[in-house]
Image (spheres, rainbow, N blue to C red):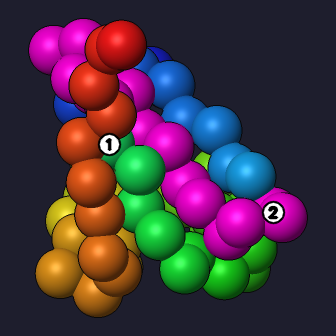
Amino acid sequence: MPSTVVAHMDYYPDSATLRITFTSGKKYDYLQVPAKIYEAMRKAASKGSYLNRFIKGHFPFKEVTKG
């Protein structure tokens, strides 16, 4: 089932970075995210709920800006 909050996500294992593209179009990189956290989010029934419970507030982040 598609998420109402998360449009897309990518994981970069070399840097342990999880990039979330929200349905609003904004992109954020969550840093130092273990692969097991990404895998659990990928399998979660609700991506938005998983993000709020296990990622936001637990890992540093930065907004991805153009240019």
Instruction: Give the answer, above or below, for where 11 lies relative to 61.
Output: above
Q: Which residue is mark 2?
A: 13
How many marks on residues?
A: 2
The range drawn in magenta is 13-27
Q: Which residue is mark 1?
A: 28
Q: First in sequence, mark 1 or 2: give its number.
A: 2
Of the pair 41 and 30, the residue shown nearer to us: 30
Q: Secondary structure at mark 1?
A: strand
Residue 9 image position (x, y, % from top left): 55, 36
> Can you see residue 65?
yes
Q: Residue furthest right?
A: 14
Q: Secondary structure at mark 2?
A: loop
Instruction: Give the answer, above or below, for where 58 lies relative to 39.
Output: below
Q: Amino acid at mark 1?
A: Tyr
Q: Residue at x 27, y 54 (%)?
A: 62
Indicate left or right for 2 with 3 as reference. Answer: right
Q: CA distance from mark 1 to mark 2?
A: 16 Å
Q: Amino acid at mark 2?
A: Pro
Of the pair 65 and 27, the residue shown nearer to us: 65
Residue 38 image position (x, y, % from top left): 64, 64
Which of the labelled discs sits on residue 37, or is there none?
Answer: none
Q: Residue at x 56, y 76 (%)?
A: 33
Say few, some or many: other residues with alpha carbon within 10 Å of mark 1 (under 14 / 14 to 19 / 20 or more): some
Q: Residue at x 47, y 70 (%)?
A: 31
Q: Residue at x 59, y 60 (%)?
A: 17
62 in the magenta segment: no
